Amino acid sequence: LVYFGFLQCIFLLVIYTFSSEIKKSLNPYLIAFIVVLFLGLLGRVLHSLHVFGASYKLLAISEYATFLFGATVYLLTKSSVTGVQFSIRDLIHYVPGLAYIIVISIYFVFAPPSVISARVQSGELFRAVLLFMGTGLLVNFSYWILSFRLFLRFKHELSNEVSFAVKSRFFQSFLIAIGVCLVCWLVVYIVGAFEQTWIERRIRPTIWLGLAYLILFISYYMTKDPQLFKLAPIVAPKKYAQSKLTSPELD
């Protein structure tokens, strides 16, 4: 299922890349979310396929998506329910994610094996993982709460849209699914914090399965209602639209 979800990510990204029509109309934050899911699954897939000798550092690629996940969920929800177009100011939400990628790369990915081994022996790596995961959970839960509050706030305004039923059902199910994934992640974190590694190893796959289900969930709705993820067209206000002059007088 994880492999299938991963291939589905690639399939959707290829369609988006080579279809100029879809590229112009599709919500860019949906594509960003698919990219985040792709990153989240990439490290796991490469490690499972024993690429580069199945180095444990490959799993760090999946960690790159940690701080990008919640921000993208929030921006996707915001742009869809409010109709607000992409803004450069929105990129500030990705600053923590980029900072985290740099930290993980320096601290773990590019660190020599001898340094990693010393950190494992001293327990420093375990404490660092707890800190990183705990912060990631806090950030992602915060964005999830903001997203759900935003959806509930604008839910009555969505009723004016033709696709209200589908859009409302999708975002309600989507945010609930995100919440379930975060709860699974929290359980893994708590179990790992008490050093119950044998339990953690058995429940950790639920995170990967959750990401795979999310991409399949989105694919289903993209097939069911392609208009759901399209940007609302920007309609320029007509000049003198509120004027009480007659048409000949306006001319």
Image: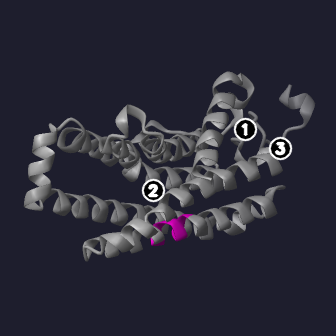
Residue at coordinates 51% horizontally, 66% vertically from top-left? 181
Say what amino acid the circle numbered 2 marks: Gly
Q: Which quadrant of the structure image shows residue 190?
A: bottom left
Residue range of the region highlighted in magenta in the rendering: 178-183
Q: Which of pointers 2 and 3 lies earlier in the amino acid sequence?
A: 2
Observer-side mark, 1 or 2, equals 2
Question: Which mark's residue is nearer the viewer, 2 or 3?
Answer: 2
Nearer to us of marks 1 and 3 is: 1
Do the numbered discs 2 and 3 sit on residues whose CB atoms are within 8 Å?
A: no
Disc 1 target residue: 233
Name the secondary structure under disc 3: loop
Q: Is residue 134 left or right of residue 40?
A: left
What amino acid type is highlighted by mark number 1? Pro
Which residue is disc 3 drawn over? 244
Residue denoted by label 2: 70
Label 2 element class: helix
Mark with earlier residue (1, 2):
2
